[in-house]
Image (spheres, rainbow, N blue to C red):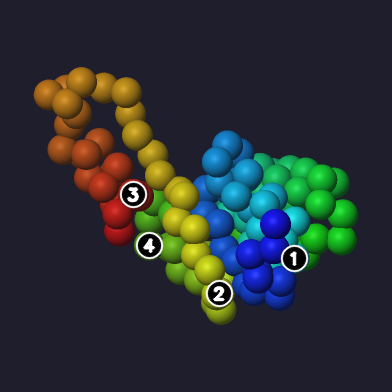
Amino acid sequence: MDLGLGGKKVLVTGSTAGIGYAAALGFAREGAEVTVNGRTQARVDDAVNGILRTAPGGRVRGVAADLSNAAGAEALIRGAPDVDVLVNNAGIFEPVPFEEITDERWMRMFETNVM
């Protein structure tokens, strides 16, 4: 399928595994310039290498940045300052009953997932 993404700059946050990784791989196969993002350099490197093995000739790079805080968001902006497509896949959750979530935990999830 050709979605017309050849040469487009695509950033997929939370893309070192799962749905985010699959999205990044799909964009790379379409010919987009893909930026992979995750919290650690090791996981980002693994994801970039995996995509390049699966989509030879793909243009893929990685930016390690923890998006749960402003410093991480700023690092990602510096690492991928100009994008055509943003897939905001980064997010966290805790499988805890609602009434047991502390204000601190709630704010951490809110800041990561929304801010």
Q: CA distance from mark 3 to mark 1?
A: 29 Å
The count of marks equals 4
Q: Residue at x 71, y 71 (%)?
A: 6
Q: Which residue is mark 4?
A: 70
- In depth, the one of 14 and 28 nearer the eye is 28
Q: Which residue is mark 1?
A: 31
Please state which of the two labelled residues, at mark 1 or mark 2, is closer to the viewer: 1
Q: CA distance from mark 1 to mark 2?
A: 14 Å
Indicate the quadrant containing the N terminus: top left, top right, bottom left or bottom right: bottom right
Q: Which mark is residue 113?
A: 3
Q: Tag 2 or tag 1, which sits nearer the N-term?
A: 1
| 87, above or below 9, in the image | above
Pointer 4: residues within 10 angstroms few (<14), some, or many (20+)? few
- In depth, the one of 46 and 69 nearer the eye is 46
Q: Tag 3 or tag 2, which sits nearer the N-term?
A: 2
Identify which amino acid the numbered label 1 is placed on.
Answer: Gly
Which residue ends up furthest to the bottom in the rendered image?
Answer: 82
Q: Which mark is residue 83?
A: 2
